[in-house]
Amino acid sequence: MPAQNLLTTHLATRANSLDYYTVLSQLLPNPDPVLKAQGKDITAYRAMCHDPLIGSCIARRKASVQALDYGLDRGQASSRAAKAVQAMLDALPLSAIIEQMQDAVFYGYQPMEVIWGKQGDLFVPVDVQAKPPEWFCFDAANMLRFKTRANPLFGEEDPGKKYLLPRQSPSYQNPYGLASLSLCYWPLVFKKGGFKFWLDFAEKFGGTFLTGKLPRSATAEERAALLDSMDAMLQNSTAVIPDDGSIEPLESAAKAASSDLYATLVAHCDAEIAIALLGQNQTTQASANKASASAGLEVTKDLRDADARLVAAAINQLIKWVCEVNFGSITCPIFSFWDQKEQDQLQAQRDKSNYDAGARYTNAYWMRGYGYQEGDLQPEPNSVSALGSAPNAAKAAAFAEPSSTPPPDPLEPDVASLMQATTPAWGGMAEQLQVLVNQAQTPAQLQQAITQAYGDLDSAELVKLMAAAMALAELKGIDSARAEL
């Protein structure tokens, strides 16, 4: 082969490997180690969902994704394509589809059959349904095939744009994906075994042992009668025995310690199952404290985000098909999940940090970023809405009666307060500080001038001096604006 072909094609393939199984069969078995060892199919995992702990963990994983906000981001897509995709999503039972797609996390893969139909002048999916994974398999080229009655051995290939296939961690070696329930199989088996022996132990040693005593000369019939009396006594606490016989209870001192072994085994298996499905067992164990439970919730959020990305990838594949069928090769809108509460908290922290650093926001920013409506916020002091339109403001200034007394200087009380609040060591700085404020044209120039003049001060004192200077500069600007009006 030419060197160029060697670089642009796959050489390490099943057809060229020593995998003799693919030579004899065109289909790939599920390489899940549990299913291979037990000779079972994916239905073995479905039966595991009836365990209370596994069922609750699955419901928790699904509910965490269902609680997220989701929607369509138009991005660079055309308006017509975005509206068509949004109409398609609105017509589908999206919440049920998302829940069904999440089964891919637990079984490794979850085929979703797409039913197409007309919606106006467009050809779009009108229904998407999850189908049993055991009905499908993969061939040597890692392509999905549906095992039918007409072709049960090799199955029928996907005709194209028919099956969505959300999978968890698929690879060339394992196109079936990683099934999270496979990690719970053996812990569940040992848990059931522990319960069985625990129940047998409780039945055998939960009650009191009875011992009967008879004279050595007692006959076999008398011993049998005493045994029947002890059996009756276990049932109804009454018995009839000879006057020369006796019945005494016996207690086993090791019963409590022995029963703890089964309880510990069951608790350990429950912890392993919780870790396999939730990534932690701190939120499912009674012995966990608040700190460990909070740390465990962070791990659960990471798994939630991973599940959301898996579902979003499948839905975006469906959106891509819709755009290709109806609009050709265009930029598609993007479907995504997000946690609005977390985003609001992060934005609020960022805005507070920027505000502390000196940034000031307008009402338009608050309305755009936090969803405030018109009238929710106070008018901005220097905005047109606070002073009226520019022509009206000019007319009001022109026809206003001149004041007999000049307006008070707003800097005077602040300068006086500044002089009183400062220590004697700062007494001579106020006048020099005001000179620097008057000479500076921008805040950057003011900061540079203060740094050059007072660079030898302690950093904490320099920060206070900067704050005082900025306050004077802001008051100066307010005074200049009022003078112009």
Image: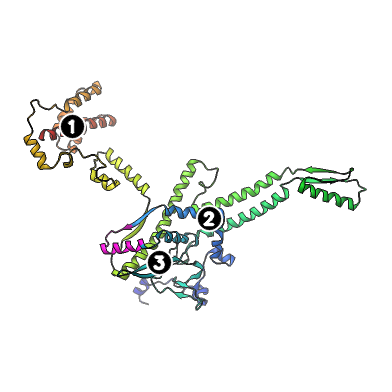
Q: For the residue marked with disc 1, what is the amino acid? A: Leu
- Say left or right for 286 vs 261: left
Judged from this view, the residue extending furthest toward the top is: 424
Q: Residues within 10 Å of mark 2 (few under 14, many from 20)?
A: few
Q: Write down the region rendered in magenta.
A: 72-90
Mark 2, secondary structure of its residue:
helix
Q: Which of the two marks, 3 or 1, is nearer to us in this view? A: 3
Q: CA distance from mark 3 to mark 1?
A: 65 Å
Question: Could you say which quadrant of the image residue 123 lies in?
Answer: bottom left
Q: Which residue corresponds to mark 2?
A: 55
Residue 175: percent from left, percent from top: 46, 67
Q: For the residue marked with disc 3, what is the amino acid? A: Asp
Q: CA distance from mark 3 to mark 2?
A: 27 Å
Mark 1, secondary structure of its residue:
helix
Q: Which mark is residue 127?
A: 3
- Say left or right for 17 vs 426: right
Q: Is residue 78 magenta?
A: yes
Q: Which mark is residue 475?
A: 1
